[in-house]
Image (tube, rainbow, N blue to C red):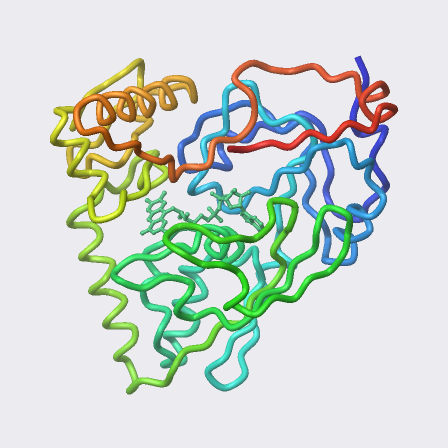
Amino acid sequence: MTNLLEYLPPVRGKIEAHVPLQNMTYLHVGGDAEVFFEPADSDDLIHFLRKHPAAVPITVLGAGSNVLVRDGGIPGVVIHLGDWFKRIFKEGTTFEVGAGALVANFAENAAQQDVSGFEFLSTIPGTMGGCILMNAGCFGRSIKDILLEMEAVDFQGRMHWMPAQKIGLTYRKSSIPNDWIILRAWVCGSVLASGLVLRCMAELRAARAAYQPTGCYTAGSAFKNPEGKNAWELISAVGLRGARQGRASISEKHANFLLNDDNATAEDLESLGETIRNKVQQKTGIDLEWEIVRLGTRTPTVTDWAQVIGQGSILRGGV
Ligand SMILES: Cc1cc2nc3c(=O)[nH]c(=O)nc-3n(C[C@H](O)[C@H](O)[C@H](O)COP(=O)(O)OP(=O)(O)OC[C@H]3O[C@@H](n4cnc5c(N)ncnc54)[C@H](O)[C@@H]3O)c2cc1C
């Protein structure tokens, strides 16, 4: 057995082998990252990407609010953007937001300065990078409505700048290539009367607490809403609201939320999700599409990196 760390370039940030990811995701399940890398800054990240062997798979983890890490963990390197990537700069009503910044913190920051337009973000638990990739949204607004431009680096260390119109932002989807890591975004709002933005945000948070489960391990909506339908209504209609499988369950309050309410495994949650998909398919003919991004392998894998790197094969994680 070989240790992947031996084949990776030296970095200034934090890099470790076999790091548990359970507590880094909102579902609190899953195995280890084979290697976990938190770059010191963008130069450190770019240097790593330019020098790492191309055969080593890379997975990006944001706040972990929309992922299910499988029980076997994630082979290769998991990259997480730490403090340096959380910086926020303001110029007028335009903000430069680091991809690692939590969008709720950013929305609060903007509201304190009476800049409006980002209130919906105050109820979403992800980072700016994760939210752009997923075109996250709620209350009738999404990232598409506020994004001007973004900067990314690809897995070979090449930089890319993209105006929002070219990112293909549609419902919970973007056309950003899966070997890009978003680094920064520029978003634009407008000025409102003093205190109004904070009040509006408080109302949105209260509205959300009324219809979604809170204080539990979940990744938000498990499935995308099919065209013209609500996933939660379809799941309720096939009688699965509140159903359990293994130690996972479907929320009574919002039938599109999978819950880890009793030390569930990733397998419990994923099989329950597949049960939902099968039953909805059988009874309605509709194929529900996972919104949760499932990462890694069901059982632990042992890779002979010397051989893989020698052969130059390329692996990718995530569906
Ligand atoms: C309680 C709850 C409520 C939620 N409500 C909503 C909602 O109302 N609307 C909504 O849209 N979503 C909602 N979500 C889902 C989630 O918050 C969003 O999808 C969010 O955009 C995920 O961001 P993240 O940083 O947590 O990304 P992660 O979950 O860590 O990752 C999601 C995907 O983004 C990729 N990614 C992350 N960072 C980057 C980066 N810098 N560059 C490239 N790729 C990256 C990952 O590889 C992965 O494929 C909710 C989740 C929870 C737990």
Using the image as rendered, state which of residue 49 and residue 24 is in the foreground: 49
The residue sitting at 60% across, 15% down in the picture is: 300
The residue sitting at 55% across, 23% down in the picture is: 31
Give percent across and percent down for residue 163: 57, 70
Residue 248 sits above or below residue 126 on the image: above
The residue sitting at 42% across, 65% down in the picture is: 144
Give percent across and percent down for residue 101: 52, 58
Give percent across and percent down for residue 209: 20, 50
Using the image as rendered, state which of residue 86 and residue 237 is in the foreground: 237
Q: Is residue 16 left or right of residue 80?
A: right
Quadrant housing residue 229: top left
Residue 280 sits above or below residue 72 on the image: below
Q: Residue furthest front?
A: 285
Quadrant housing residue 292: top left
Give percent across and percent down for residue 150: 58, 65
Using the image as rendered, state which of residue 241 and residue 224 is in the foreground: 224
Quadrant housing residue 205: bottom left
The residue sitting at 73% across, 38% down in the picture is: 15
Using the image as rendered, state which of residue 148 and residue 116 is in the foreground: 148
